[in-house]
Image (cartoon, rainbow, N blue to C red):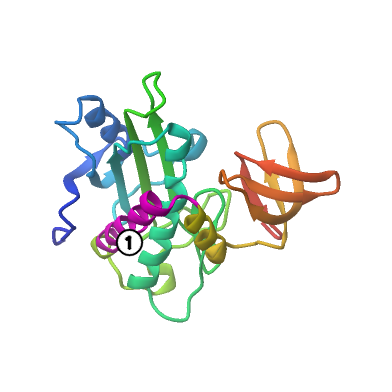
């Protein structure tokens, strides 16, 4: 496999096997900015203990893309949370670049990417504040099903190979990094408004009835909007609800 060619803002760390790229990125970030400056990117061919949102185990055999980006944005932690949506746009555009025509790509709240209505990629954002308002670091984890996908996931899943896409992990990584650089610059210069607008253009299910499964309740309603903080807005029988965390299911899932 060829070595990725990335823009100079990235510092690539390549590993054959790791417990988790996010865990490794955290270890590097904790050693300080000199050891792991903004733009340090951990890429592994296999994870032995990959994790997704809410600590779920992430199926991580060889053949897929697993990477984690260390960022040190000079913004409050609440603002840094918007980077999940920035990254979603970058993945969407990356798939549009490396994918084949005739396929549908959508974003699914809060941080999944769908290919032909099945999950092909997921994002995980983790932040360390150290007690201050500005985070010490932000870790953006990305997993893309290139060669294989789990058959026992809570949601329908797919992979590039299952959809007859020839693109490789390196193709996807290179494209994501270029698009993320572009979208993150737009976010820094113009704020969350254009990110929110473009995310809504690319999302799945707006205007449809969905089910949001939270820790202690299930909320059903029509997905109407994404608010200025990135929360999902549902129109329910009891009025409008803002959902800040949870799993979203569409009809038939």
Which residue is situated farthest in the bottom direction here?
Answer: 102
Disc 1 residue crowd, few under 14, some 14–19, many 20+, Cα 10 Å:
many
| Span colored in magenta | 172-192
Query: Which residue position holds label 1?
Result: 179
Q: Quadrant of the C terminus?
A: bottom right
- Rendering coords of residue 252 (x, y %): 70, 60
Q: Nearer the viewer, residue 45 or 95?
A: 95
Q: Quadrant of the N terminus?
A: bottom left
> Splitting the image into 4 quarters, where does residue 128 fall?
top left
- Rendering coords of residue 86 (x, y %): 42, 52
Q: Residue at x 38, y 36 (%)?
A: 75
> Splitting the image into 4 quarters, where does residue 241 fall?
top right
Q: Secondary structure at mark 1?
A: helix
Report whether 222 appears left or right of 171: right
Q: Residue at x 72, y 50 (%)?
A: 234
Q: Nearer the viewer, residue 146 or 242?
A: 242
| For residue 168, above or below residue 20 | below
- Rendering coords of residue 191 (x, y %): 44, 50
- Rendering coords of residue 76 (x, y %): 42, 33
Query: Does 189 appear in magenta?
Result: yes
Q: Residue at x 23, y 40 (%)?
A: 38
Q: Residue at x 68, y 45 (%)?
A: 212
Q: Is residue 206 visible?
A: yes
């Amino acid at each position: 496999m060829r070595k990725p060619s990335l823009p100079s803002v990235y510092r690539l760390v390549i590993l054959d096997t790791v417990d988790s790229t996010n865990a490794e990125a955290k270890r590097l970030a904790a050693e300080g900015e000199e050891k792991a400056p903004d733009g340090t990117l951990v890429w592994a061919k296999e994870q032995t203990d990959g994790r997704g949102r809410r600590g779920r185990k992430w199926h991580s055999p060889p053949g897929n893309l697993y990477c984690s980006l260390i960022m040190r944005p000079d913004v409050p932690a609440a603002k840094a949370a918007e980077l999940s949506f920035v990254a979603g746009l970058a993945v969407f555009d990356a798939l549009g670049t490396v994918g084949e025509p005739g396929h549908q790509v959508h974003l699914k709240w809060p941080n999944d990417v769908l290919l032909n209505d099945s999950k092909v990629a997921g994002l995980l954002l983790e932040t360390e504040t150290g007690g201050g308002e500005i985070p010490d670091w932000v870790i953006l984890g990305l997993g893309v099903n290139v060669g294989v996908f789990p058959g026992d996931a809570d949601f329908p899943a797919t992979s590039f190979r299952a959809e007859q896409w020839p693109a490789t992990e390196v193709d996807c990584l290179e494209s994501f990094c270029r698009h993320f650089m572009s979208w993150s610059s737009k976010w820094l210069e113009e704020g969350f408004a254009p990110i929110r607008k473009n995310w809504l253009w690319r999302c799945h299910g707006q205007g449809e009835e969905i089910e949001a499964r939270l820790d202690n309740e299930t909320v059903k309603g029509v997905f109407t909007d994404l608010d200025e903080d990135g929360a999902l807005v549902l129109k329910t029988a009891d009025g409008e609800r803002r959902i800040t965390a949870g799993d979203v299911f569409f009809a038939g899932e």
